[in-house]
Image (tube, helix red, strand yellow):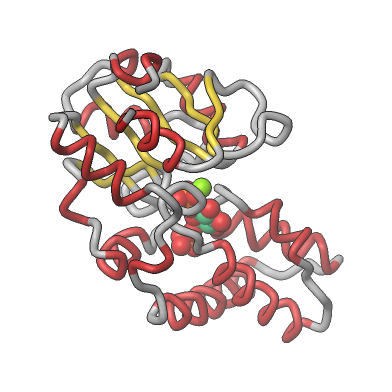
Amino acid sequence: MDTRLQKYRGMIFDLDGVLVDTATYHYLAWRRLARELGFEFTEGDNERLKGVSRMRSLEIVLEVGGLSLSDAEKQAAAAKKNAWYVEYLCALDERALLPGAKDYLEYLRQDGRRIALGSASKNAPLILERLNIGRFFDAVIDGNSVGRAKPDPEVFLKGAGLVSLPPKDCAVFEDSRAGIEAAKRGGMFAVGVGRKELLPGADMYIASLADCYGKQKN
Ligand code: B16
Ligand code: MG
């Protein structure tokens, strides 16, 4: 087992990119919107949207297309994209869980750790239900419950508060730069899920939660 994680009593997980791969569905919906607006949106462009709120994502998409919309048009475009995204989410099931996610959550529960979700997504409750993993979480903080987006630490500080632990006793698992920055600003241990070059500033790096689980078993 990795001794660096053993001492944290609270584990806070980002959702998209850590527990589940929904980036593909976000991509399909943003690309559909871009095409309707008359431009192409590539998978490379989509990388810029990871961990970013829905409205900020729309601004990035519009920047790629060189378009500007009024506030009312932006609201309508974001709602349209979300309706398509939610439609795609209906195809989601446990197979979309990333390697090690369910095993590691099960291990942590049995070990008596407190577990929170800290996601920017307003669709987090639906995704947890589709993946059948809601029972693992003592607290769920998502895009519906925070006012300030990552890299503001609000989402993780609320998570620590809801599991009644000080930030220094919590480890955060994140796949986005903004999320790593939020965890550090909140005074937590930051585990980068992904490559060090893409996620500067984390305290340790893993390729997926399978790395933690494998080490826990040995
Ligand atoms: P929604 P996370 C984030 O989730 C996604 O990474 C990001 O691409 C998305 O724009 C954001 O949620 C908002 O999602 O439109 O469903 O509210 O990584 O913070 O779990
Ligand atoms: Mg993420």
Left or right: residue 28 compared with residue 161: right
Left or right, residue 107 beside residue 201: left
Closer to us: 113 or 27: 113
Residue 41 vertical position relative to residue 15 in the rendered view, above or below: below
| Picture quarter with the C terminus | top left
Which of the 4 image quarters holds residue 36? bottom right
Identity of the residue drawn at 19% across and 48% down: 136
**In the picture shown, does residue 209 fall above or below 72?**
above
Q: Give above or below for 42 relative to 181.
A: below
Image quarter hosting the N terminus:
top left
Give the side of residue 178 with respect to residue 148, left or right: right
Q: Residue at x 50, y 31 (%)?
A: 152
Residue furthest right as drawn: 66
Q: Position of residue 213 (x, y in %)?
A: 36, 37
Residue 85 percent coordinates (x, y): 50, 75
Q: Quadrant of residue 126?
A: bottom left
Residue 65: horizontal and vertical position, in percent? 83, 69
Q: Nearer the viewer, residue 147 or 124?
A: 124
Residue closest to the eye, 23 or 142: 23
Residue 75, x across and y down, in percent: 55, 70
Q: Residue at x 49, y 37 (%)?
A: 174
Return the residue found at the far bottom. Answer: 36
